Image (cartoon, rainbow, N blue to C red):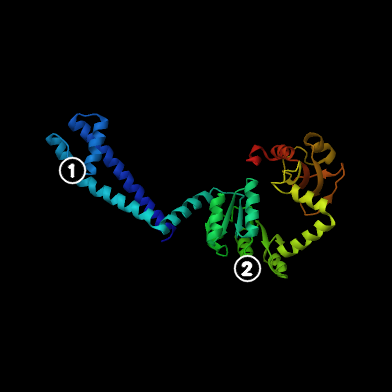
Amino acid sequence: MDLSSISRKIRYAKILLFSLLLLFVFGIVGFMFLEKISVIEAMYLTIGTLTTVAPFDLHDEGRVFALILIFFGFGLVATTAAFIGNIFLDANGLELYRRRKVQKKLQKFSDHYIICGHGQMGQIVAAELQQSGKELVVLEREEQALMRCREAGITYLDQDATDEEALVEAGVERAKAVISLVNRDADNVFIVVTARALNPDIFISARANTKGVEKKLYHAGANHVVSPYASAAVRIIQNILRPTITDFLDTAISTEGGLPLQLEELKVPDDAPFVNRTLMDSRIRNDFDLIIVAIQRRNGSRVYNPSSLEPINAGDTLIAIGPRDNLDRFMEMLYGPEALT
């Protein structure tokens, strides 16, 4: 059974239920007209007649009508009950129905994040994105991982991320980023190649599990590659040599840090009020109490610790640090109230 099959079954079930409703209304109106009774009494007679629960004291016209109702209705009631019961008793059918609901939900997603794999790294990434209020979908086949997604309220697809159709169903053409975190390097490379082919403009971050795979992932089309073991080694060294700086940066970029100051990157839209003005004239520091620590130009070049006379152009990315509330106000000014939803 596939999604098209379950869709047909659900469509047939809706037709049966609608037919049953019409028959019910027909019975109520008929008994009201023939027996001169109230709506409640007509409903009672109709339900009793359709379920053949008990005999009723009716006039001859009412008895003929009841026979007609039983003749046409009993079979419809039995067929509807059996058909719907079969759908819900079929475990595979229930899973396909859930997939169909998820598919409809995903069709509304845009600029969302696709996480391939919900292992240890996938859990952390998904939790951070969820904490930030981002829309995401997880592609995973392992049952325990799917159970974790259900418990966390994360949208997921029980599909292999290396399958092109799975990425299409996850909305890769409309997604903001694909994050490939599966355990096998070959699978990560294949996911990157497939995602890049389906959406040439999407941002792709991938995991490299063994040395030397980073180059292959970059050649396959990844924008950013993370080697967990190399990153962990650097993290240990930094914690030893520069513990205060490391703790500050870790807390500043975390959504759960609770630090008064946080780091954020903000792309300057074309209609920003300070486009083509200097950093001093933009009044970002005065109005929002934010510090711009770096500016990345549209061509990828960076200006670190920019001076007050550094111009801000449309398409630049500002690396700002400041209180979370001030960052939110700045984002609302740049992108509108919907940026915070």
> How many residues crowd around disc 1 within 10 Å: few (fewer than 14), some, or many (20 or more)?
few
Whole-percent x and y of residue 219? Answer: 70, 67
Q: Splitting the image into 4 quarters, where does residue 194 fall? A: bottom right
- When asked about the image quadrant of residue 209, the answer is bottom right
Label 2 SS: loop
Residue at 82% across / 51% down in the picture?
Answer: 245
The residue sitting at 67% across, 61% down in the picture is 206
Q: Earlier in the sequence, mark 1 or mark 2?
A: 1
Q: Amino acid at mark 2?
A: Arg
Report x, y in % for residue 111.
62, 49
Image point 22% across, 36% down: which residue?
A: 45
Q: CA distance from mark 1 to mark 2?
A: 66 Å
Which callout, 1 or 2, points to the residue nearer the camera? Answer: 2
Check disc 2 and report the residue beneath it.
184
Q: Position of residue 313 (x, y in %)?
A: 78, 45
Relative to 130, residue 281 above or below: above
Query: Looking at the image, how many numbered discs can be counted on the residues?
Result: 2
Q: Give the camera-side residue of 234 and 73.
A: 234
Foreground of the two, 65 or 158:
158
**Between residues 121 and 80, which one lies in front from this camera angle?**
121
**Quadrant holding the C terminus:** top right
Q: Quarter of the image holding residue 49?
A: top left
Is 64 on the left-hand or right-hand side of 301? Answer: left
Q: Is residue 227 visible?
A: no
For mark 1, what is the residue? 68
Residue 293 horizontal/vertical position (percent): 82, 46
Residue type at mark 1 is Ile
Q: Determine crowd level at label 2: few under 14, some 14-19, many 20+ residues with C-alpha closer than 10 A.
A: few
Q: Vertical placement of 191 versus 106: above or below?
A: below
